């Protein structure tokens, strides 16, 4: 018998295989008809739930590598593979990267089977399809494609399968597999969302999207993902729509400011002070008095400091984290202003920018906004407001040319026809859950109706 | 993939070309601009002297050293020195010349921060300059792209510069403080409040006459009051006193609030005050047999704001009626006086011409060119003002 120590459940092997094999066979005679040796061993001797008979060497090796035990019996031209897999897994904990106030507290773990269970537990429906395959020629990482049969468009499923087949990397990093089959690898914007939250994935499945889960990472990908998906949070749906809608809107506003605030400050103060109300002009002018650097250099330094502090905050052990914020925020900010190296309004602008970045619910969306700030600042410093507008238009053009699994990235903000206008109900603002009677049309779901008129029963979350 | 790369390279190349081409063209740090907040225009002191006066003169190929333009700028200073007295809130720069543009540029030669006009709040003309005509001077200030429509125009008796130089009680730049004064114009309608560059520029283009408020300085105080009347050639030809401005607003249908003090009907030695809070005024032109006349009908609703006779029963209908009558008479007098005064000055700034144009366009065409000089001064007006006192008792 062959198994890999540490990956198998030793108790199960002892109890169900070795113990049974060494005991005298009493039950054999009770069989109604004589069985082959292999079947005898599988069905009457070994008491494990899952056994298979394998004749090829390769699957046997694969199974052993995944933690099963293979039983070779002399004279038998096959091996009996017993599922004895036992993996030490982390307990299901709260998702750390996506905090929600009222969302469920469970998050995906690194174990694929656990993650699938988390989804299955939420959708008790045989039409929830999970197809498995492996990715990575050497690593053979398990991948599960999850979708709702009857809702998800077939071409979308096919597209995901096709792309997964094309991956030829030998050992991909589990959390980074999405970058291997994402659209537009050269774009700065993420075209696929990864989530740690089962409830988020469930909601996406219910809309007709497809989940792709990888073994070894708690992040599941959702395809297709559009721009607005990055600004949604589960809390939007757990609260009444009237307070939730403006809160979601503030995320767009803060995304805009996170992107443009330093650039606007540079452009306005060094090119168009007439845009500010007179008292504000004088206040800013007074506070800039004696600062040695031009606004652009000043903003550039502060922006650099901000990014360094943010990075330090992530990399440091949690115990030293507060020290960074004290040194960074208080000492550098306050001391720099006192020393006259930086003007106070710029410190306000920088911290506002940072806070605005934090309020975007998705980290993946925050990154491009952070990165694009700098080119916008350069444009602002060279061309003023004209440059900022130029940059924003370029970004808008780029966004509208992106696609995610065949869907336009800006869908459903840019409806194809007036019939698709109802998709806007759940984008920048939102309507009450009872009014979201249809699934997003841009996904071309097989069943577009989410809430049936006569029956109030809903398929899932709203 | 190659296509994307080529596009990226192209974009990068474009950026590299365009950014230096722009060359930070208009870039100027916010603290390096001279924010002109107020402009005062006087005649340059007579007598060609030497020294300081030569220093102030703007180089001009033609023209005289006619005007003295003073600009008020805020003083940027670090927080530590905030206790500096208010006299040092501002900086003043003057230069002399006939061309406004040359003068403005002449000041630029004396400071490193360029004069920046987008934040100008007020512009003051001395009375002497105003009497000579402000149309030519205004040309530069209307032409310059940086000037806002909201700049308030004022006239100062004596030297305009002194208004900017004055040391007010408040800790604010003089121009900023003065520019905020019209905020109370509704409650205290004794000076013209619609006197911005934008409005005046419209009047100039439409060849209308207009009024500007006077700015009076006494000691540490400043006040807007009265009106300087300009004819259609932008020359100041006279002034209206405070009640004439009040009456002017009444006829212009702009009166919203206001107080009149009348002799108390209950006790002639004492006074009572009426406070207007709702005015419904209607002025109608009538053309009968080629003769034009106006009729003004107004309904004023207000309250007795003050009654210095103690123990007077304010609900007494006789008292109320007498009060209403006294107030109506007072208002009629105020309006009549303003109307007569403007007829005498041969200017019409009530906007009555517009009413005539609206009602009798054909007739207006025939009188348009001699409206202010001939037609308006001989056009009578009937004034009927009904006053109603509401809420007479607020005091127990």
Image: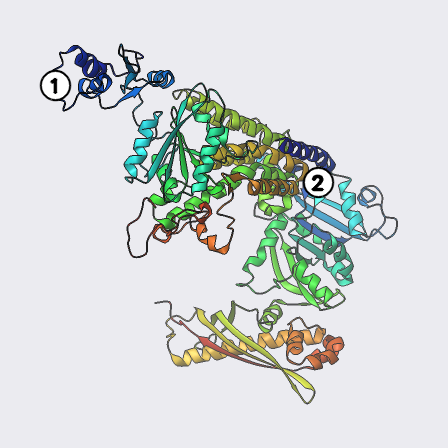
Instruction: Indicate left or right for A202 with A287 as reference.
Output: left
Kindly indicate whether the residues beneath marks 2 and 1 are on one polypeptide chain: no
Determine which residue is flagged by label 2.
Answer: B26
The picture places residue A332, in percent across and down from the top left corner, at 51, 25
* Residue closest to the eye, B301 or A454: A454
Marks 2/1: CA distance? 100 Å
Image-quadrant location for residue B344:
bottom right
* Residue closest to the eye, A200 or B261: A200
* Residue closest to the eye, B91 or B118: B118
Give the answer, above or below, for where B387 lies relative to B93.
Answer: below
Chain under callout 1 = A
The picture places residue A130, in percent across and down from the top left corner, at 35, 34
Q: Quadrant of the N terminus of chain A?
A: top left
Image-quadrant location for residue A231:
top left
Give the answer, above or below, for where A70 lies relative to A418.
Answer: above
Q: Residues within 10 Å of mark 2 (few under 14, many from 20)?
A: some
The picture places residue A137, in percent across and down from the top left corner, at 46, 21
The reply to whether residue A93 is visible in this rendering is no
Nearer the camera: disc 2 or disc 1:
1
Q: Residue at x 60, y 74 (%)?
A: B251
Determine which residue is flagged by label 1.
Answer: A29
């Amino acid at each position: 018998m062959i198994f890999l120590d540490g990956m198998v459940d030793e108790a199960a092997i002892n109890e169900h295989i070795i113990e049974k094999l060494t005991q005298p066979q009493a039950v054999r005679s009770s069989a109604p008809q004589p069985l082959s040796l292999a079947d005898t061993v599988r069905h009457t001797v070994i008491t494990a739930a899952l056994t298979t008979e394998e004749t090829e060497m390769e699957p046997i090796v694969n199974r052993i590598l995944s933690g099963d035990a293979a039983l070779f019996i002399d004279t038998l031209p096959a091996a009996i593979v017993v599922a004895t897999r036992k993996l030490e897994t982390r307990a299901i904990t709260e998702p750390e990267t996506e905090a929600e106030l009222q969302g469920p507290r469970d998050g995906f773990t690194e174990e694929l089977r656990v993650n699938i269970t988390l989804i299955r537990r939420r959708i008790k429906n045989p039409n929830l399809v999970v197809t498995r395959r492996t990715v990575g020629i050497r690593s053979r990482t398990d991948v599960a494609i999850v979708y709702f049969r009857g809702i998800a468009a077939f071409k979308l499923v096919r597209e995901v399968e096709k792309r997964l087949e094309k991956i030829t990397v030998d050992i991909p990093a589990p959390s980074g597999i999405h970058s291997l089959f994402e659209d537009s690898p050269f774009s700065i914007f993420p075209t696929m969302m990864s989530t740690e939250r089962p409830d988020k994935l469930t909601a996406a499945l219910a809309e007709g999207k497809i989940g792709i889960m990888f073994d070894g990472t708690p992040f599941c990908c959702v395809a297709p993902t559009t721009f607005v998906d990055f600004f949604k949070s589960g809390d939007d749906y757990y609260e009444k729509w009237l307070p939730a809608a403006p809160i979601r809107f503030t995320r767009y506003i803060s995304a805009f400011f996170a992107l443009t605030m330093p650039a606007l400050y540079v452009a306005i103060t060094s090119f168009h002070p007439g845009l500010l109300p007179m008292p504000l002009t004088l206040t800013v002018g007074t506070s800039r008095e004696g600062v040695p650097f031009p606004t652009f250099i000043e903003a550039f330094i502060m922006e650099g400091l901000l990014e360094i502090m943010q990075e330090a905050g992530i990399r440091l052990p949690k115990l030293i984290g507060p020290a960074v914020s004290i040194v960074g925020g208080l000492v550098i900010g306050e001391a720099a202003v006192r020393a006259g190296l930086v003007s106070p309004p710029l410190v306000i602008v920088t911290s506002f920018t940072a806070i605005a970045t934090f309020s975007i619910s998705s980290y993946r969306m925050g990154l491009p906004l952070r990165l694009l700030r700098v080119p916008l600042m350069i444009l602002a410093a060279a061309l003023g407001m004209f440059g900022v507008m130029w940059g924003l238009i370029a970004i808008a053009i780029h966004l509208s040319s992106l696609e995610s699994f065949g869907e336009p990235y800006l869908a459903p903000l840019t409806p194809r026809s007036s019939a698709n206008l109802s998709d806007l109900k759940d984008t920048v603002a939102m309507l009450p859950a009872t009014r979201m009677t249809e699934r997003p049309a841009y996904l071309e779901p097989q069943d577009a109706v989410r809430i049936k008129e006569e029956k109030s029963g809903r398929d899932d979350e709203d | 993939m190659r296509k994307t790369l080529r596009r990226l390279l192209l974009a990068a190349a474009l950026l590299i070309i365009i950014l230096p081409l722009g060359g930070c063209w208009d870039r100027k740090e916010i603290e390096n601009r001279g924010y002109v907040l107020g402009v005062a225009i006087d005649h340059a002191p007579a007598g060609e002297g030497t020294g300081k006066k030569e220093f102030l003169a703007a180089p001009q190929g033609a023209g005289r050293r006619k005007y003295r333009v003073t600009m008020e700028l805020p003083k940027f200073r670090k927080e530590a020195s905030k206790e500096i007295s208010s006299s040092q809130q501002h900086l003043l720069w003057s230069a002399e010349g006939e061309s406004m543009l040359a003068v403005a540029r002449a000041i630029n030669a004396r400071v490193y921060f360029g004069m920046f006009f987008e934040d100008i709040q007020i512009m003051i003309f001395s009375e002497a300059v105003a009497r000579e005509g402000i149309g030519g001077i205004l040309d530069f200030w209307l032409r310059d792209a940086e000037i806002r429509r909201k700049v308030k125009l004022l006239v100062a008796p004596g030297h305009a510069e002194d208004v900017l130089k004055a040391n007010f009680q408040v800790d604010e730049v003089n121009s900023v403080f003065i520019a905020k004064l019209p905020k109370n114009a509704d409650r205290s309608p004794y000076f013209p409040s619609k006197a911005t560059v934008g409005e005046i520029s419209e009047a100039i283009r439409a060849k209308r006459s207009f009024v500007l408020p006077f700015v009076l300085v006494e000691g540490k105080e400043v006040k807007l009051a009265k009106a300087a009347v300009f004819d259609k050639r932008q020359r100041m030809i006279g002034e209206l006193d405070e009640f004439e401005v009040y009456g002017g607003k009444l006829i212009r249908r702009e009166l919203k609030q206001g107080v009149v003090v009348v002799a108390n009907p209950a006790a002639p030695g004492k006074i009572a005050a009426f406070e207007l809070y709702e005015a419904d005024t209607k002025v109608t032109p009538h053309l009968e047999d080629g003769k034009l006349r106006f009729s003004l009908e107004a309904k004023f609703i207000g309250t007795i704001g003050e009654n210095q006779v103690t123990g007077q029963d304010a609900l007494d209908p006789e008292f109320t009626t007498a009060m209403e009558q006294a107030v109506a008479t007072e208002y009629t007098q105020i309006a009549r006086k303003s109307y007569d005064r403007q007829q005498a000055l041969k200017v019409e700034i009530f906007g009555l011409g517009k009413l005539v144009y609206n009602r009798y366009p054909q007739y207006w065409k025939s009188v348009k060119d001699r409206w202010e000089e001939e037609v308006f001064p001989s056009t009578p007006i009937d004034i009927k003002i009904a006053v109603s006192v509401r809420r007479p008792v607020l005091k127990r």
